[in-house]
Image (tube, rainbow, N blue to C red):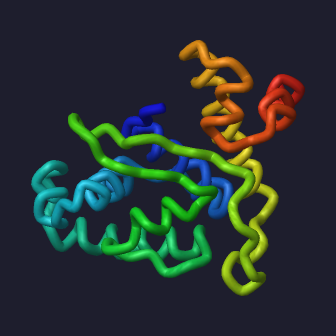
Amino acid sequence: MLMDIHEVLQFVDKVVCAKTGKRLNDLQRGIIEGTLKQQKYSEIADTYRLTQGHVKDVGYELLQMLSDTFDEPVDKGNLKSVLERQDNLNISFGNNNIIGYINVCSDRPTATPDENPPKTPDFQQAKDEAKIETIGKLRQFGLSDEQIAEVLRLTLEEVKQVDKAL
Protein backbone atom coordinates (compact mmCIF):
# COMPACT_ATOMS: atom_id res chain seq x y z
CA MET A 1 0.00 0.00 0.00
CA LEU A 2 1.36 3.44 -0.89
CA MET A 3 1.21 6.10 1.77
CA ASP A 4 1.80 9.74 0.92
CA ILE A 5 3.78 12.11 3.13
CA HIS A 6 0.54 13.50 4.58
CA GLU A 7 -0.32 10.10 6.07
CA VAL A 8 3.15 9.71 7.58
CA LEU A 9 2.84 13.19 9.10
CA GLN A 10 -0.55 12.21 10.55
CA PHE A 11 1.06 9.21 12.23
CA VAL A 12 3.86 11.33 13.71
CA ASP A 13 1.34 13.97 14.81
CA LYS A 14 -0.80 11.35 16.60
CA VAL A 15 2.19 9.85 18.39
CA VAL A 16 3.57 13.27 19.40
CA CYS A 17 0.13 14.39 20.60
CA ALA A 18 -0.35 11.19 22.60
CA LYS A 19 3.01 11.68 24.31
CA THR A 20 3.13 15.48 24.71
CA GLY A 21 -0.43 16.74 24.30
CA LYS A 22 0.85 19.06 21.53
CA ARG A 23 0.08 18.97 17.80
CA LEU A 24 2.64 19.60 15.07
CA ASN A 25 2.36 23.01 13.43
CA ASP A 26 2.79 23.65 9.71
CA LEU A 27 6.48 24.51 9.97
CA GLN A 28 7.22 21.41 12.06
CA ARG A 29 5.41 19.28 9.50
CA GLY A 30 7.41 20.99 6.74
CA ILE A 31 10.67 20.31 8.56
CA ILE A 32 9.82 16.61 8.92
CA GLU A 33 8.83 16.37 5.26
CA GLY A 34 11.90 18.30 4.14
CA THR A 35 14.18 16.19 6.32
CA LEU A 36 12.75 12.98 4.86
CA LYS A 37 13.38 14.45 1.39
CA GLN A 38 16.96 15.34 2.48
CA GLN A 39 16.36 19.07 2.06
CA LYS A 40 18.57 21.63 3.78
CA TYR A 41 17.12 24.08 6.29
CA SER A 42 17.72 26.86 3.73
CA GLU A 43 15.42 25.09 1.23
CA ILE A 44 12.72 24.60 3.86
CA ALA A 45 13.09 28.26 4.89
CA ASP A 46 12.60 29.38 1.27
CA THR A 47 9.41 27.32 1.03
CA TYR A 48 7.93 29.00 4.13
CA ARG A 49 9.49 32.42 3.43
CA LEU A 50 11.27 32.38 6.77
CA THR A 51 14.88 32.88 7.75
CA GLN A 52 17.17 29.88 7.76
CA GLY A 53 18.06 30.64 11.39
CA HIS A 54 14.42 30.50 12.50
CA VAL A 55 13.82 27.22 10.67
CA LYS A 56 17.02 25.80 12.17
CA ASP A 57 15.90 26.81 15.70
CA VAL A 58 12.43 25.26 15.22
CA GLY A 59 14.05 22.18 13.70
CA TYR A 60 16.32 21.77 16.72
CA GLU A 61 13.34 22.03 19.12
CA LEU A 62 11.34 19.60 16.96
CA LEU A 63 14.14 17.03 16.94
CA GLN A 64 14.40 17.33 20.74
CA MET A 65 10.64 16.79 21.04
CA LEU A 66 10.81 13.76 18.73
CA SER A 67 13.74 12.40 20.76
CA ASP A 68 11.60 12.63 23.91
CA THR A 69 8.58 11.18 22.14
CA PHE A 70 10.38 8.17 20.66
CA ASP A 71 12.71 7.69 23.66
CA GLU A 72 15.85 7.78 21.51
CA PRO A 73 18.06 10.52 20.03
CA VAL A 74 16.62 11.97 16.80
CA ASP A 75 18.54 14.20 14.39
CA LYS A 76 18.25 15.11 10.71
CA GLY A 77 20.51 12.22 9.77
CA ASN A 78 18.55 9.48 11.54
CA LEU A 79 14.91 10.69 11.45
CA LYS A 80 13.95 8.18 8.76
CA SER A 81 15.57 5.31 10.66
CA VAL A 82 13.88 6.30 13.93
CA LEU A 83 10.48 6.44 12.21
CA GLU A 84 11.10 3.07 10.58
CA ARG A 85 11.71 1.54 14.02
CA GLN A 86 8.36 2.75 15.30
CA ASP A 87 6.19 -0.34 14.97
CA ASN A 88 8.11 -1.33 11.83
CA LEU A 89 7.16 1.62 9.63
CA ASN A 90 8.79 1.14 6.25
CA ILE A 91 9.44 4.46 4.53
CA SER A 92 10.85 4.69 1.05
CA PHE A 93 10.60 7.43 -1.52
CA GLY A 94 9.35 6.78 -5.03
CA ASN A 95 8.25 9.12 -7.81
CA ASN A 96 6.17 12.18 -6.95
CA ASN A 97 7.38 12.10 -3.33
CA ILE A 98 5.18 9.13 -2.46
CA ILE A 99 6.28 7.17 0.54
CA GLY A 100 6.39 3.46 -0.18
CA TYR A 101 4.24 1.96 2.54
CA ILE A 102 3.69 1.75 6.22
CA ASN A 103 3.70 -1.76 7.59
CA VAL A 104 2.20 -2.01 11.05
CA CYS A 105 3.39 -5.32 12.45
CA SER A 106 2.86 -7.18 15.66
CA ASP A 107 5.45 -9.90 15.13
CA ARG A 108 8.66 -7.91 15.38
CA PRO A 109 11.54 -9.48 17.32
CA THR A 110 11.36 -9.12 21.07
CA ALA A 111 13.67 -6.36 22.26
CA THR A 112 15.68 -6.37 25.42
CA PRO A 113 14.25 -4.05 28.09
CA ASP A 114 17.04 -1.50 27.53
CA GLU A 115 16.33 -1.21 23.77
CA ASN A 116 12.67 -0.26 23.96
CA PRO A 117 11.39 1.31 27.16
CA PRO A 118 7.72 0.67 27.94
CA LYS A 119 5.38 2.83 25.90
CA THR A 120 2.71 4.93 27.54
CA PRO A 121 -0.91 3.82 27.09
CA ASP A 122 -1.59 6.91 24.96
CA PHE A 123 1.38 6.09 22.71
CA GLN A 124 0.14 2.51 22.31
CA GLN A 125 -3.37 3.80 21.59
CA ALA A 126 -2.01 6.05 18.81
CA LYS A 127 -0.21 3.07 17.26
CA ASP A 128 -3.36 0.95 17.53
CA GLU A 129 -5.38 3.71 15.83
CA ALA A 130 -2.82 3.82 13.01
CA LYS A 131 -3.15 0.03 12.61
CA ILE A 132 -6.96 0.30 12.48
CA GLU A 133 -6.76 3.09 9.88
CA THR A 134 -4.34 1.04 7.77
CA ILE A 135 -6.61 -2.01 7.86
CA GLY A 136 -9.59 0.18 6.90
CA LYS A 137 -7.72 1.65 3.94
CA LEU A 138 -6.64 -1.78 2.73
CA ARG A 139 -10.26 -2.92 2.90
CA GLN A 140 -11.24 0.11 0.81
CA PHE A 141 -8.80 -1.11 -1.82
CA GLY A 142 -10.71 -4.39 -1.86
CA LEU A 143 -8.27 -6.61 0.02
CA SER A 144 -9.70 -9.54 1.93
CA ASP A 145 -8.97 -9.99 5.63
CA GLU A 146 -6.61 -12.84 4.70
CA GLN A 147 -4.68 -10.60 2.28
CA ILE A 148 -4.52 -7.79 4.86
CA ALA A 149 -3.21 -10.20 7.50
CA GLU A 150 -0.50 -11.33 5.08
CA VAL A 151 0.49 -7.81 4.00
CA LEU A 152 0.63 -6.48 7.57
CA ARG A 153 2.08 -9.70 9.00
CA LEU A 154 -0.80 -10.02 11.45
CA THR A 155 -2.88 -13.02 12.35
CA LEU A 156 -6.31 -13.26 10.76
CA GLU A 157 -7.79 -12.91 14.25
CA GLU A 158 -5.96 -9.60 14.79
CA VAL A 159 -7.40 -8.22 11.54
CA LYS A 160 -10.91 -9.37 12.46
CA GLN A 161 -10.59 -7.73 15.89
CA VAL A 162 -10.63 -4.37 14.15
CA ASP A 163 -14.34 -4.89 13.47
CA LYS A 164 -14.88 -5.45 17.18
CA ALA A 165 -12.93 -2.29 18.04
CA LEU A 166 -15.19 -0.15 15.86
Nearest the camera: 155 or 127?
Answer: 155
Nearest the camera: 76 or 96?
Answer: 96
Nearest the camera: 87 or 70?
Answer: 87
Q: In this view, does 13 lie above or below 81?
A: above
Which residue is located at x 59 percent, y 60 percent? Answer: 86
Which residue is located at x 27 percent, y 41 percent? Answer: 94
The answer to whether residue 86 is left or right of residue 45 is right
The answer to whether residue 29 is left or right of residue 94 is right
Q: In this view, does 96 lie above or below 115?
A: above
Which residue is located at x 75 percent, y 81 percent? Answer: 112
Give x and y (percent) for residue 92: 36, 50
Q: Quadrant of the C terminus?
A: top right
The answer to whether residue 14 is left or right of residue 51 is right
The answer to whether residue 9 is left or right of residue 46 is right
Which residue is located at x 54 percent, y 46 percent? Answer: 11
Residue 155, by quadrant, is top right
Give x and y (percent) for residue 125: 76, 49
Residue 164, by quadrant, is top right
Give x and y (percent) for residue 139: 63, 19
